[in-house]
């Protein structure tokens, strides 16, 4: 393996691995998986992927290998989150410790167990912190996606797993960014992409597990000059493919957050990694 080629390792997912037997037959097991989970999860297959962000210091244009994973077909809804806080009272509005959720946590709700007037139960839940989103996904036997998992899934359109070079793909996404956020969010359930996943663009921003590891530098002097890169943790992340504005806007937004942050346009969805078959 070359130094410019990194693998996202598979993480055991409990009973999920016993349901899915081999990648070739994985799609046949997804309905059984979803019926056990309550939520609908679909397979995002393994494959090479060119991220808009380099993955290591001095690593320019490296390809990453995305391991297969199951992703929720839609963002977590208000009704689903309401059911969660009913059984997890520590995450009700007013009960979550300040260190885990800022003052705007579920601010639009009328009460700890009452969504605000006009909020549709089928709309995506927002105003949830990273801590809260993570706890919700754990309640489904899942976790938040990594940035690379989210980015690779979000590259798809209705016919292709990676449609980023197709005319109109980026423009369609940017048109959403250009519109003001509606007072009340519409329900989930937009057109499905080639994987059967909906609403990755055009509805809400979404938490990723490693949001605090994202770092970009828009200073043109750092582009292509390894001596002037800025470092964050173990690696330097500078912008690759700066014409990918739609995705880079998400990077900039997510990297500005704290783990207790909430926003009216910030929601979540969960993923489950696939487990290797026993030999």
Image (cartoon, grey):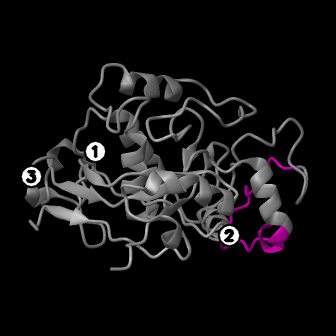
Cα–Cα gap, marks 1 and 2: 38 Å
Q: Which quarter of the picture shows residue 122? A: top right
**Left or right, residue 94 beside residue 208:** right
Query: In the image, which disc is placed on residue 139?
Result: 2
Q: Residue furthest top?
A: 167
Is 107 covered by the magenta stretch?
yes
Q: Which mark is residue 218?
A: 1
Apparent side of residue 15 relative to residue 264 in the rendered image (left or right): left
For label 2, the crowd category at 10 Å Cα-Cα, with few meaning under 14, some 14 to 19 and many 20 or more, is some
Q: Is residue 214 above or below residue 151?
A: below
Residue at the spot of label 3: 225
The N terminus is located in which quarter?
bottom left
- Lateral position of residue 35 relative to residue 228, left or right: right
Residue 92 drawn at (x, y percent): 82, 65
> How crowded is the residue under tag 3: few (<14 C-alpha within 10 Å), some, or many (20+)?
few
Image location (x, y in percent) of residue 148: 36, 55
Left or right of residue 224: residue 279: right
What is the secondary structure assignment of the residue under circle 2? helix
Per the rendering, the mark at residue 49 is none
User: Compared with residue 186, is residue 238 higher up or lower down, i.e. above or below?
Assistant: below
Which residues fall within the magenta stretch?
A: 87-109
Instruction: Kindly identify the residue that appears in the image at 77 percent across and 68 percent down.
Output: 91
Pointers 1 and 2 in contact (C-beta within 8 Å): no
Q: Position of residue 209 (x, y in %)?
A: 48, 64
Q: CA distance from mark 1 to mark 3?
A: 13 Å
Of the 4 image quadrants, the one containing the C terminus is bottom left
Label 1 vs 3, first from the N-terminus:
1
């Amino acid at each position: 393996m070359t130094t410019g080629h990194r693998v996202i390792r598979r993480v055991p997912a409990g009973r999920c691995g016993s349901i899915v037997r081999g990648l070739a037959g994985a799609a046949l097991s997804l309905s059984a998986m979803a019926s056990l989970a309550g939520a609908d999860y679909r397979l995002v297959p393994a494959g090479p992927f060119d991220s808009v962000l380099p993955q290591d210091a001095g690593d320019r244009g490296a390809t990453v290998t995305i391991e297969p994973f199951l992703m929720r077909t839609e963002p977590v809804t208000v009704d689903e989150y309401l059911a969660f806080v009913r059984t997890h009272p520590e995450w009700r509005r007013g009960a979550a410790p300040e260190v885990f959720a800022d003052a705007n946590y579920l601010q639009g709700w009328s009460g700890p167990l009452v969504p605000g007037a006009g909020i549709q139960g089928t709309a995506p839940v927002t105003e949830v912190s990273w801590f809260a989103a993570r706890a919700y996904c754990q309640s489904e036997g899942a976790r938040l996606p990594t940035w690379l998992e989210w980015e690779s899934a979000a590259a798809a359109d209705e016919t292709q797993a990676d449609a980023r070079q197709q005319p109109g793909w980026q423009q369609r996404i940017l048109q959403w960014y250009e519109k003001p956020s509606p007072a009340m969010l519409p329900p989930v359930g937009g057109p499905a992409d080639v994987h059967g996943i909906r609403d990755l663009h055009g509805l809400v921003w979404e938490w990723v597990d490693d949001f605090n590891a994202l770092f970009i530098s828009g200073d043109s002097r750092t582009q292509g000059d390894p001596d002037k890169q800025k470092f964050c943790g173990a690696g330097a992340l500078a912008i690759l493919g700066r014409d990918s504005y739609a995705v880079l806007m998400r990077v900039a937004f997510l990297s500005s957050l704290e783990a207790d942050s909430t926003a009216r346009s910030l929601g979540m969805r969960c993923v489950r990694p696939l487990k290797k078959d026993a030999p």
